[in-house]
Amino acid sequence: MPYFVYRVAPVGALTLIGEFGVYKDAKVCATAQRADQEAADRDRVRIVFAADTVEAEQLLTTPRERQPSEDD
């Protein structure tokens, strides 16, 4: 399964930046994208491991359940 690098806008819009077969290549791409971002840019750069772009986008848009902390 490949690694996908996405730009995620605050409103939830997803932009595919690249697809990589090796995590190291995806990490290099994501790090470069983050370094090139303007300070005022609120977009996040995310790496996701998925079978295809449909699954990757589903994983990025599905809210994660809150994990209970020790204080709960």
Image (spheres, helix red, strand yellow):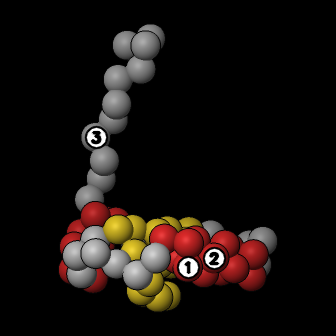
Q: Nearer the viewer, residue 24 or 44?
A: 24
Q: Nearer the viewer, residue 19 or 72?
A: 19
Viewed as shown, does residue 9 lie left or right of 66? right
- Residue 25's mark? 1
Determine if residue 41 is in view.
no
Describe the element under mark 1 as helix, strand or loop. helix
Task: State the CA–CA distance, disc 1 to disc 3.
Answer: 29 Å
Q: Residue furthest top?
A: 71
Q: Amino acid at mark 2?
A: Val
Where is mark 2, residue-wise? 28
Q: Which residue shows up at 28% across the image and 75% down it?
A: 1
Describe the element under mark 2 as helix, strand or loop. helix
Task: State the CA–CA distance, disc 1 to disc 2.
Answer: 5 Å
Q: In which image quadrant can residue 56 be found?
A: bottom left
- Residue 44's mark? none
- Circle 2 packing at 10 Å, graded few (<14), some (14-19), many (20+), is few
Viewed as shown, does residue 56 lie left or right of 23? left
66 versus 55 height, above or below: above
- Dot in front, 1 or 3: 1
Q: Amino acid at mark 3?
A: Glu
Determine if residue 56 is in view.
yes
Q: Earlier in the sequence, mark 1 or mark 3?
A: 1
Q: Which residue shows up at 75% across the image and 75% down it?
A: 35
Where is mark 3, residue-wise? 65
Residue 20 position, x and y percent, is 44, 83
Residue 12 position, x and y percent, is 40, 71
> Do the residues under discs 1 and 2 have CB atoms within 8 angstroms?
yes
Task: State the CA–CA distance, disc 2 to disc 3.
Answer: 29 Å
68 versus 38 height, above or below: above
Q: Amino acid at mark 1?
A: Asp
Q: Earlier in the sequence, mark 2 or mark 3?
A: 2
